[in-house]
């Protein structure tokens, strides 16, 4: 089959490898936010489609037989576009979304509905691990009374608008003890993140539980 995967997640890359090994013609589409993404089996395209109309054209011109939405759980717009485009192009659509993290005994979660609420929940003089994509940083620039440790995969192209911050480059550790050491060494009092699920980013939640650090968690 000719398959297009809307990817950008570890699960999508793993799925692409499995489908290629099964003999399918697979193309993975990435948004392009990571400068040097890890290699993915099959073909890879980078960048948007130009909305629903562009995605319909791509599906038709490339004779795609199956569209798989394996994007980040908070990538609402591309998921909505996939539903509309697949229907219009008469292409089968599969949606594979990570399960959200579940709250466990000992977790101190402050659950909010959006990033604006997360920003407003932060107390004065908090020291925050901000575990979000670079496109969501601007919302927090009004909190000049808060220190932000901003974890990013790539060095940003321009200076962040946050008045009081430090950039931490790299992926999160899968080891909760390493994440705990990070929180301790930076005197972190709060974590702000989205309930994106996946084991790769969960260690910070375990570390926060062990240290009784509040996690301001943006719900699905």
Image (cartoon, helix red, strand yellow):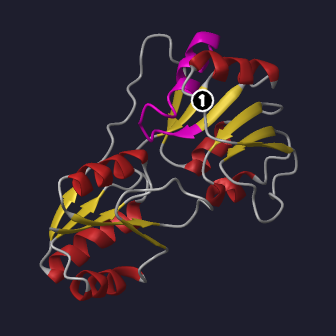
Q: Is residue 108 left or right of residue 121?
A: left
Taking 141 as reference, is 180 left or right? left
Residue appearing at x 42%, y 16% in the figure = 104
> What secondary structure is found at the residue carrying circle 1?
loop
Which part of the image, by quadrant, shows the N terminus?
A: bottom left
Q: Is residue 191 left or right of residue 43?
A: right
Residue at 23% in and 52% down: 21
184 lies above or below 29: above
Which of the 4 image quadrants contains residue 3? bottom left
Q: How far across and down, in percent of the image, does residue 168 sit?
A: 76, 41
> Where's the C terminus, which quadrant?
top left
Q: Which residues are magenta?
A: 193-212
Q: How many marks?
A: 1
Q: Which image quadrant for residue 41?
A: bottom left
In percent of width and height, residue 38 lies at 52, 53
- Mark 1: few/some/many CA within 10 Å (<14, 14-19, 20+): some
**Residue 138 among those drawn in magenta:** no
In the picture shown, does residue 166 fall above or below 204? Answer: below
Q: Vertical placement of 203 versus 211: above or below?
A: below
* Residue at 41% over, 37% down: 197
Q: Position of residue 135 (x, y in %)?
A: 63, 60
Question: Which residue corresponds to the image point at 30% horizontal and 83% vertical from the top-left?
Answer: 58
Could you say where residue 124 lies in the image, as x and y percent from the top left? 80, 33
Kindly tell me whether residue 133 is visible in this rendering.
yes
Residue 131 in the image: above or below residue 8:
above
Where does label 1 land, which residue?
Answer: 173
**Residue 200 located within the stretch drawn in magenta:** yes
Comparing 212 with 110, the one in front is 212
Tell me if I can see residue 123 in this picture. Answer: no
Quadrant of the image occupied by residue 150: top right
């Amino acid at each position: 089959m000719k398959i297009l995967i809307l990817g950008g997640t570890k699960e999508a890359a793993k799925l692409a490898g499995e489908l290629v090994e099964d003999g399918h013609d697979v193309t993975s589409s990435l948004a392009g936010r990571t400068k040097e993404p890890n290699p993915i089996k099959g073909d890879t395209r980078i960048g948007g489609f130009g909305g629903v109309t562009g995605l319909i054209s791509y599906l038709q011109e490339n004779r795609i037989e199956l569209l798989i939405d394996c994007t980040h759980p908070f990538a609402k717009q591309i998921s909505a576009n996939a539903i509309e485009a697949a229907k219009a192009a008469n292409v089968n659509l599969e949606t594979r979304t990570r399960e959200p993290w579940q709250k466990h005994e000992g977790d101190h979660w402050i659950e909010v509905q959006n990033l604006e609420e997360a920003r407003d929940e932060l107390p004065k003089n908090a020291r925050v691990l901000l575990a979000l994509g670079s496109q969501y940083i601007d919302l927090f620039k009004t909190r000049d009374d808060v220190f932000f440790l901003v974890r990013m995969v790539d060095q940003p192209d321009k200076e962040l608008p946050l008045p009081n911050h430090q950039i931490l480059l790299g992926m999160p550790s899968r080891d909760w003890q390493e994440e705990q050491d990070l929180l301790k060494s930076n005197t972190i009092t709060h974590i702000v993140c989205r309930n994106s699920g996946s084991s790769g980013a969960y260690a910070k939640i375990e570390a926060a539980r062990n240290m009784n650090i509040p996690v301001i968690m943006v719900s699905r």
